[in-house]
Image (spheres, rainbow, N blue to C red):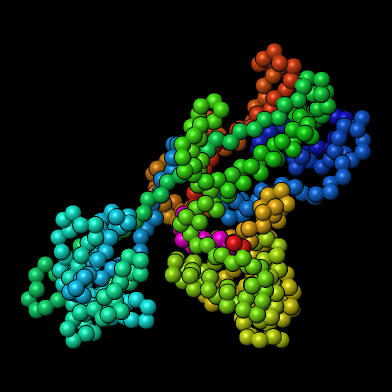
């Protein structure tokens, strides 16, 4: 087996490999670079080893750290997320002259159904003016665009809204939330039937394809390894360096697509006329349904004197959402070091005396500026550099996204295939698969080289295909850190 080191004893038992009795080029007897130790990278006639000036160039790993992959049978995945428990609006307008009415969007106008009912007691606020009011009745909506409610204000002698609230408009609205109810003696039909609110989301998989082609003459550069299984049978595994790089680049694309993909705003087709619609990746989902922290000088602000205050503003926003205790920060190098600097100023030799939480306030650990985790308020944060944000051929080229905060939790959903409720990470991948075909990562060989006589082309074509989509559940708990 020229050009290869001795294969490990377990090589023939690797799950993704099926040794073939002949030296044939098949998609399931391809030997990956990571499957064995190599004495040299090329075949003997090219004996100089390539200089690895870029180190490990692959950027995969993010989704393996924070998510999972699961099969799906349909061309769309649908899930529902619970709504808020309490009733609140930030689009409240006031009525005209009477100043005893408020207006909310009519059912369906903003995707919400007004849930106020007679007898409810509410807090209405705008700026520094806050009053408490009683919902007296609901005005029949008719053809009106707004839903009108008659109210009585507890805090004013005439029951009318004060001037600061009476002027609430669509451009400068007030806010309200329900805090209870009140009914008179002997009242009937008390209470309001409020259905549990939820929101349904969906995403569709996209098909990713790539291939590597080499002519028949150059296939002579393929290296072969003969292996023997535990039961005495044997076979051959094959390797080609350029094909290997095509494979790992495609695996990078699988992850990058799930992070970067977005839905097409208009319909269009590819060169063959097939519809292209896109899918919603991680960044697109957070920008639409999650939290985005914008600052043109994010890294320097975090490292500055007010860095902790800036970070606390993110915590205050998390308090308004799910308040998930454990979170992971995937950062570019500049932001990661800035957070280290921010934390270093808070040790016992500086100001503030902030608790280090997961560091157990250990002085030795606190003075080590390579923090891997910390606690602030009621939250634990674990941070790491994300190579995708640093690489100069990916997001490091643009340098606009400084990091992403991902909650370390699971959601309980009903799985149609299993017929039961299961727990899934907030961030996970669904790929198309059935008993007939698994499209998680397919690989097959065509051409007229190496025993695969599928055409008269004097070449070997290695094809790669995957069909997958990203599910970002509870996106309101994710934070995208942007320097824009």
Above or below, 396 against 115 in this view is above
Question: Compared to 26, does 373 lie above or below?
Answer: below
Quadrant for the C terminus, please.
bottom right
Instruction: Please count the marks in the image.
Output: 0
**Residue 440 image-quadrant placement:** top right
Q: In this view of the protein, which residue sits in the foreground, 404 or 462?
A: 404
Instruction: Inspect the magenta stretch and tell me whether residue 292 lies in it.
Output: no
Q: From this viewpoint, which residue is outermost toward the top?
A: 456
Quadrant in which the N terminus is drawn: top right
Q: Residue 35 at what x, y percent from top left?
A: 75, 40
Location of residue 229 in the rendering, given as x and y in whole percent from the top left corner: 73, 32
Left-right relation of 111 to 433? left
Q: Is residue 112 left or right of residue 97?
A: right
Residue 53 point in image, percent of width and height: 84, 48
The residue positioned 51% from the left and 56% from the top of the image is: 286
What is the x, y in percent for residue 305? 65, 80
First to last magenta residue range: 473-482
């Amino acid at each position: 087996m020229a050009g290869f080191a001795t294969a490990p004893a377990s090589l023939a038992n690797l799950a993704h490999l099926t040794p073939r009795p002949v030296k044939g080029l098949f998609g399931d007897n391809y030997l990956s670079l990571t499957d064995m130790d190599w004495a040299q990278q090329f075949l003997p006639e090219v004996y100089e080893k390539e200089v690895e000036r870029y180190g490990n160039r692959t950027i995969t790993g993010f989704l393996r750290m924070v998510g999972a992959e699961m099969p799906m049978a349909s061309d769309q995945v649908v899930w529902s997320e619970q709504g808020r428990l309490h009733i609140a609006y930030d689009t409240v307008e006031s009525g005209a002259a009477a100043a005893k009415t408020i207006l909310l969007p009519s059912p369906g106008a903003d995707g919400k159904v007004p849930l106020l009912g007679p007898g409810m007691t509410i807090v209405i606020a705008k700026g520094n003016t806050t009053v408490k009011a009683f919902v007296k009745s609901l005005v029949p909506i008719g053809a009106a665009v707004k839903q009108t409610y008659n109210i009585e204000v507890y805090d004013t002698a005439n029951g009318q809204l004060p001037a600061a609230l009476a002027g609430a408009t669509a451009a400068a609205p007030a806010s309200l939330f329900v805090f209870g109810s009140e009914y008179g003696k002997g009242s009937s039909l008390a209470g309001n039937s409020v259905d549990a609110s939820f929101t349904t989301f969906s995403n569709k998989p996209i098909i990713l394809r790539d291939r590597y082609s080499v002519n028949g003459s150059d296939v002579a550069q393929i290296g072969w390894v003969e292996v023997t299984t535990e039961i005495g049978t044997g076979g051959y595994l094959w390797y080609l360096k350029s094909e290997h790089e095509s494979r790992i680049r495609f695996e990078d694309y699988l992850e990058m697509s799930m992070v970067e993909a977005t839905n097409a705003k208009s319909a269009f087709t590819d060169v063959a006329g097939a519809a292209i619609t896109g899918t919603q990746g991680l960044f697109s989902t957070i920008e639409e349904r999650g939290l985005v922290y914008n600052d043109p000088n994010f890294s320097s602000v975090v490292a500055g004197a007010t860095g902790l205050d800036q970070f606390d503003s993110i915590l205050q926003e998390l308090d308004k959402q799910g308040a998930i205790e454990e979170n992971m920060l995937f950062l570019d190098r500049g932001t990661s070091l800035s957070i280290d600097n921010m934390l270093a100023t808070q040790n016992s030799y500086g100001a503030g005396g902030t608790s280090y939480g997961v560091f157990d306030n250990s002085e030795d650990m606190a003075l080590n500026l390579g923090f891997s985790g910390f606690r602030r308020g009621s939250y634990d944060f674990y941070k790491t550099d994300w190579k995708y944000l640093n690489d100069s051929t990916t997001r490091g080229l643009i340098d606009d996204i400084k990091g992403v905060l991902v909650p370390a939790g699971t959601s309980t959903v009903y799985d149609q295939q299993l017929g039961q409720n299961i727990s899934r990470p907030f961030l996970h991948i669904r790929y198309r698969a059935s008993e007939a075909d698994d499209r998680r990562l397919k690989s097959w060989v065509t051409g007229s080289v190496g025993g695969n006589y599928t055409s008269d082309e004097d070449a070997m074509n290695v094809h790669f295909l995957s069909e997958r989509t990203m599910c970002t559940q509870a996106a309101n708990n994710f934070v995208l850190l942007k320097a824009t």
